[in-house]
Image (cartoon, rainbow, N blue to C red):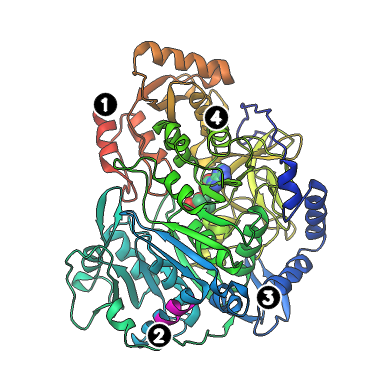
Amino acid sequence: MSEPTIESILQEKRLFTPPSEFSQQAVIKSQQEYQALYEKAKSNPEQFWAELAETELHWFEKWNQVLDWNPPFAKWFVGGKLNIAYNCLDRHLTTWRKNKAALIWEGEPGDSRTYTYAQLHREVCLMANVLKQLGVQKGDRVAIYLPMIPEAAIAMLACARIGAPHSVVFGGFSAEALKTRLVDADAKVVITADGGFRKDKIVSLKPEVDQALANNGAPNVKNVLVVQRTEEKVHIEPGRDHWWHDLKAGVAAHCPAEVMDSEDMLFILYTSGTTGKPKGVVHTTGGYNLYTHTTLKWAFDLKDTDVYWCTADVGWITGHSYIVYGPLSNGATTLMYEGAPRPSNPGCMWDVVEKYGVTIFYTAPTAIRSFIKMGEHYPNARDLSSLRLLGTVGEPINPEAWMWYHRIIGREKCPIVDTWWQTETGGFMITPLPGAIPTKPGSATLPFPGILADVVDLDGNPVKANEGGYLVVKYPWPGMMRTVYGDPDRFRRTYWEHIAPQDGQYFYFAGDGARKDDDGYLWVMGRVDDVINVAGHRLGTMEVESALVSHPAVAEAAVVGRKDEVKGSEVFAFVSLEGDYEGTEALSQELKQHVAHEIGAIARPGEIRFTDALPKTRSGKIMRRLLRNLASGEDVAGDTSTLEDRSVLDKLRSSGE
Ligand code: WT7
C-alpha cells in the first residue's frame, strides 16, 4: 500500500525542555535514562516487566511464567497469586502510610471527606462483607452505578477484595443503557445511590435502576445496594433493595483479601463501538495492577508528598486506572471531585486546587477548551502555585489549548504530560516522562518503556517519517485488554485483523491515525474513521480543528466531511466562538482564509456553521457521526444515548434550516 493513510499538514515546531529543578527530583531524570529503560525493555520485555512486578507489587505466590502469548490472547504472570485491593490498601497499613490521606473527596455542594489508608481499608472491608451477605461470591459480576462519591472507589475495591469482577456503569447513562450492560455482564448485584449532584442539579440514579430492572429487565440482579447521597425520596423494593448504611451497621470490619490468580478477571468496562452493541472490555488482575502502577509512577512522577487530582469520572477507564487503582497501589493521595464547572461556580476547579494544594492535575482537552472559553480570570483569581505537573488525555490536544494550559495553569513551569491510551490498553502507552522528555505542543511524544509502538501502512510496513499511517502496538503489554466479554471472536476481529498478521507478528490496532516526526515523536491525528478525503488528500480532523482554534475568535471547532461532486468531500466546520465575537459572514470568510493560510488551500472549509456548543458524549468526545449527518442535511441516525446535552443537537438542527 503506497497511499498514505492520512496526510500531515500541521507543523508545530515549539519545543519545551523539562525545567532542571523538575528533572533533578524526578523518578526518571533524563532522556538518557529513558532511552536506557526503553532499550532494556525492548530487548527483553518479559524480563523488564518481571523485575518490576517483583519490586513494585506484593504477591501471595510468585508466577511460573511471565507471558503466555497465544495471539491475540495474552496471559501475564501465569500462576502468580495476588489481590489488587491488598496492593492498594493492606500493604500500606504496615508502613507510615497507615494514617496518610488515601482519598480526599470534595462534594459539589461543598461537603467533603478525607479517608486515611486505614479508614479506607475499613470501609472497603465493610462493603466487601455486605456484598458477601448479599450472596456475592468470587467470580460473580457486580454492577456499580454511582455518582462521584467515595463509595464508588470503595465499591470497586470491595469487589476486587472478594474477587467479584465489577462493571462500572457511568452515572450519566440512561436506564436503557444500564439495562443492556447489566444483561451483557449478567450482573448479580447493583450498587447505586439515590442520586448525585452535578452542575447545580440533582441527577437521579435509583429511579433509573428501578426502570432498568422493571419487567424482569435484568433477571439475574437479585439485590440492589443503595448509598444515600441526595436524601431525595426513592422507592425501596422490599427484599431486593437495601440501604448501605443499614447493612453496614451489621457486618464485621474484618474481611481477608481473596487470593486471586493473576489472570482472574478484575473488571469489565463497556466502551461504545461505532456500530453494534457496546463492547465489554475485560481487564485482569496482575498485569493491570502492575501496568497502572508503573505508568502512573513514572509518567506522573508520583511522590508521597503529592496531592494528585484526576478530573475524570470513575465510570471511564481513566477513573479506574488513574483515580483508584494506580494511585492507591502507589500509596499516593488521590483526590476525587463530585462537581463540574457550573453556573453557580465556573471557577470551582481552581477552588479545589487551592483548597487542597493540588500538585498534579490531570484533565482532558475538552475541559481545557472550556476553561479557555470561561476566561483566565477564574484561574488567575486563585493561588495555583502548588501545581508542579499537568496532564491531558482523551483526544489530541490542539497546540493552542496546550499553550494556554502551559501559560495560565502551569505558569510556564509545570511540564505537561499528554498521555495517549485507550480503554483497551488499560494505561498510558505514549506519554512523555516529565523529567526526561522535552515536549512539543500536540504530541504525546514517545512510547512508554516496554511499549513497541509504530506507525504502519495496511501491510504492517512502517511508513516514512512525517507520513501518516496507522498507530499500532507490536508486542503484548501487561495492561492490555484480554478479550471482549463473552465474545473472543469480536476481540480478534476488532483489534487484530485490521492489519493482517505477518510471519507470526500481530499488530494491535484500535483505530487511530498518527505520524512520527524526525525525532521519532508520535503525533496522534485522530480516529481513522473521521478522516476527510478532499480531492484525494486524506486530512485528519484534528489538524484542521487546531488551525481554527488558533484564531482568536474560536473557542472550539469540529470538522467533518461533506460530499462534494468535484472534490469527493469538502471540509465542513462547526465552530463555537469566544464570548465577544459574533458569527457574521465576514468572520466566516476570515476563518476560511485563516485555515487556508495556516495549513493550505486544500483544507479550506467549504462551509462554517456557528453554534453555541458541540454535541459531545459525557466523556467529552465530539460525536462527529452526528455532525456528519447534519452537514449533509440528513436526519441524525443511530444511537444518541451517550450525548451529554440533547438540546445541543436540537439547536444545531434548527440553525441549519
Ligand atoms: C481514544 C480512546 C484513555 C482514556 C480516555 C479515552 C483518543 C486518548 C489521547 C491523546 C490523542 C487521544 C484516541 C484513543 N485519545 N488520549 N493523548 N492524544 N488522542 O479513552 O474512550 O477508550 O478513547 O481517545 O482516539 O483511541 P477511550
Is ligand 1 closer than 8 angstroms to the Cβ of mark 1? no
Is ligand 1 closer than 8 angstroms to the Cβ of mark 2? no
Indicate the position of residue 615 as horizontal and vertical percent values. 35, 39
Mark 2 to mark 1 CA distance (whole Å): 55 Å
Question: Please, what secondary structure does the residue beneath circle 2 have?
Answer: helix
Would you name the residue on which mark 1 appears?
655
Would you name the residue on which mark 3 appears?
77
In this rendering, is residue 416 above or below 220? above
Q: Earlier in the sequence, mark 2 or mark 3?
A: 3
Q: Residue at x 61, y 54 (%)?
A: 428
Would you name the residue on which mark 4 appears?
400
Query: Which region of the structure is painted magenta?
Result: 121-126
**Mark 4–mark 1 contact, CB under 8 Å?**
no
47 relative to 313 in the view: left or right: right
Indicate the position of residue 163 as horizontal and vertical percent values. 49, 80
Badge 4: residue crowd in 10 Å (few <14, some 14–19, many ≥20)? some
Between marks 2 and 3 in the image, the one whose residue lies nearer the viewer: 2
Q: Earlier in the sequence, mark 2 or mark 1?
A: 2
- Amino acid type, callout 2: Asn
| Residue 281 is at least partly visible in this image | no
Quadrant where the N terminus is found in the figure: top right
Badge 1: residue crowd in 10 Å (few <14, some 14–19, many ≥20)? few
Quadrant where the C terminus is found in the figure: top left
In this rendering, is residue 463 above or below 102? above
- Amino acid type, callout 1: Ser
Badge 2: residue crowd in 10 Å (few <14, some 14–19, many ≥20)? many
